[in-house]
Amino acid sequence: MSRLSVVLLYLAIDALAIFLTFYFIYILRFERATLLRWPPDLFQIRLFSNPHFLDHLEIIALMGLFLIVLLYKNGLYETPRGKRFSEELGALISALAMTLVLGWTLSFLLQRFVLSRLVLSVFPIALVPVLGGWRYLKRKWVEYLIAHGYRRNRALIVGAGKMGRYLERALKDSPELGIDVVGFLDDHLALRPDKTLKLPVLGTLADFSTVAVQLGIHDIYITIPSERAKIKSLIEHAYELGINVHIVPELFDLLVRQIKFESVGSLTLLRLFEPTLSSWEQRLKRLEDVIIASLLLAIFAPVMALIALAIKLDSPGPVIYKQRRHGLNGVPFWLYKFRSMYHGADETKHRELAKKWLRSADPIDEQAHVYKLTRDERITRVGRIIRKFNLDEIPQLWNVLRGEMSLVGPRPPLPYEYEEYEEYHKKRLTIKPGITGLWQVSGLHKLSFEEMVLLDLRYINEWSIWLDFEILLRTISVVLLGKGM
C-alpha cells in the first residue's frame, strides 16, 4: 500500500472509533433503558432526528476533526520503526487533553447549555484505550510482518569498533526494526581481520559504493563520525545511491536530556542542558514509586508470607538477606532480598565473575547468567524457584518506600563492582537505582557491562513516566515467563 493509502485507512479507523465511542457514551448517559431490553437496541437510527443528540454530535465532530489534525501532526498516522509505543501513547494522551479543553470551550462559546459536560469530559478519556488499543494491535501486527520478512532493509555498519559491534547486536536483537546487517566497512580491520567479529568486514570506506551496489544496501549506519573528510564523501555517495544514512553521534555516551539547536553566523551549534531529572520530574517519579510500591506490597503480602515460611523450612538462616549496594551518586545503602542461598555462602566465585564481566567488552556467556550463576551450589531449593520468577526481589519494594531505590532505574552495583568503575561508568548512578530497568527487559543475561551502561544512560536521557510504565509492563512478562534464572 502507498503511504497515502495507509494514512487514509488509519484516518478512517480513527473517525469510526471516534463516532462509535461518542455514540455509546451518549446511549449510556441518556438511553440506558434501551440497553436493558433483550436483544438490546444498540443501533438507534431515530437518534439522528433527535435535536439533543445532534447538538452533541456537532460539538463532537469539531472535537474529532481537531483531534485528527493533532494526531496527524504528531505522526500518529504512521508506524515509524524504532519509535516506542510509550511515545505514541504519550502523544495521543496530550492530543486528547487538548481536545477536551476545546470541547469545553466550544460548549460555552456556542452557548449550548443543554450539552452534557459529562459526555464531553468522558469522551476524550474513553478514547485513550480505544485509539491507543487499536494502535498497539496495529503496531504489533506491523512488527510481526517486518520480523517475518516484510519490507526488510539490508544495511552496512561503518566502523567495527565497540560502538559498531554493539549496534550490530542491538539491530539483530530487534527484528521488528526490519534491518539485516550484512557486514562492516572498516579501514583498519579490512587489512587485519578480527576473528571475534560475527559478520565480515566487507572492505574499507573507499569501497562503499561498490559494496552497496553489489549487495543492494538500503541503510548505512556510521559509528565513526569524527573522521569528517571520509564521512562527508561517504554520505554524498549514499545520497547519490538513494541509501538512508544513520549516524551515531559522538555524544551518545553523555548524559544529555535536552538538546537545542542554535545559530551563530553560518554555524549550527548544539546547546546541551542539565543532564538530570528536573525537580518536578523527580517529584513525579517519587510519587509513582510510593503509590505503586505500596500497592504491590499490599498485593504481595500473602505471597511474601508463604515465601518466608518456605525459606525458613528449607534451610537454616534469616529469611531476609541484607546486602551492601551503591545507590544515587554512589552512596552506599542496604538492599533487602529474600535469602535464596545457604546462610554464610562464599561470594568469591561471584566476585571473580563480576570483575571479569566488568573488564570484558562482551558478555561472559550468552547462554549463562551475568548476575546469577547457573548451577550455583550455593542456591537452596526454594532459592531456585524464587530466583527463577524474581520473587527474591520483592523486599526491595521496602527500599523503594525508604527512598533508597526506585521501581525503575539502573542496577545497583555491589561494592567490589563499584571499585572497578571508571568516572564514565558512575554517570549511570546520577539517578536512584531500580528494581527493574532497561537492562532487564532488554536481555538481562546477554549484555556486556558497557552495553548495560549505555542502556542506563539512554534511560536517563529519555526518561518519562510513560517509559517507566512501559518497562514495568515488559517486566511482568519477564517475571511470568520465569526468565529470572
Image (cartoon, rainbow, N blue to C red):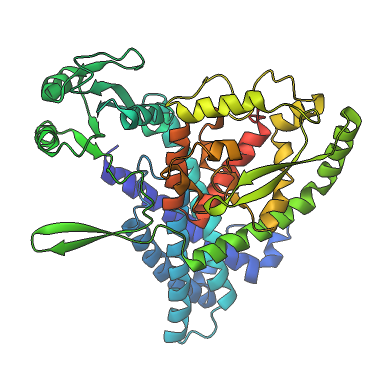
Quadrant in the picture for the N terminus: top left
Q: Is residue 110 visible?
A: no
| Percent x, y of residue 432 | 56, 53
Q: How many marks?
A: 0
Question: Seen in the image, is 331 located left or right of residue 334?
Answer: left
Q: Which of 112 and 239 lies nearest the eye of the viewer? A: 239
**Which residue sits at x=70%, y=33%?**
389
Question: Seen in the image, is 246 located left or right of residue 133?
Answer: left
- Residue 369 vs 467, above or below: the answer is above
Q: Which of 49 and 380 lies nearest the eye of the viewer? A: 380
**Which residue sits at x=64%, y=65%?**
28
**Which residue sits at x=47%, y=81%?**
107
Question: Seen in the image, is 469 located left or right of residue 229?
Answer: right
- Residue 106 vs 255, above or below: the answer is below
| Percent x, y of residue 160 | 28, 25
Judged from this view, the residue extending furthest toward the right is 313
**Which residue sits at x=51%, y=77%?**
51
Quadrant in the picture for the C terminus: top right
Q: Which of 193 and 344 lies nearest the eye of the viewer? A: 344
Q: Quadrant of residue 435?
A: top right
Question: Seen in the image, is 39 located left or right of residue 438?
Answer: right
| Percent x, y of residue 451 | 44, 34
| Percent x, y of residue 22 | 53, 64
Q: Is residue 4 visible?
A: yes
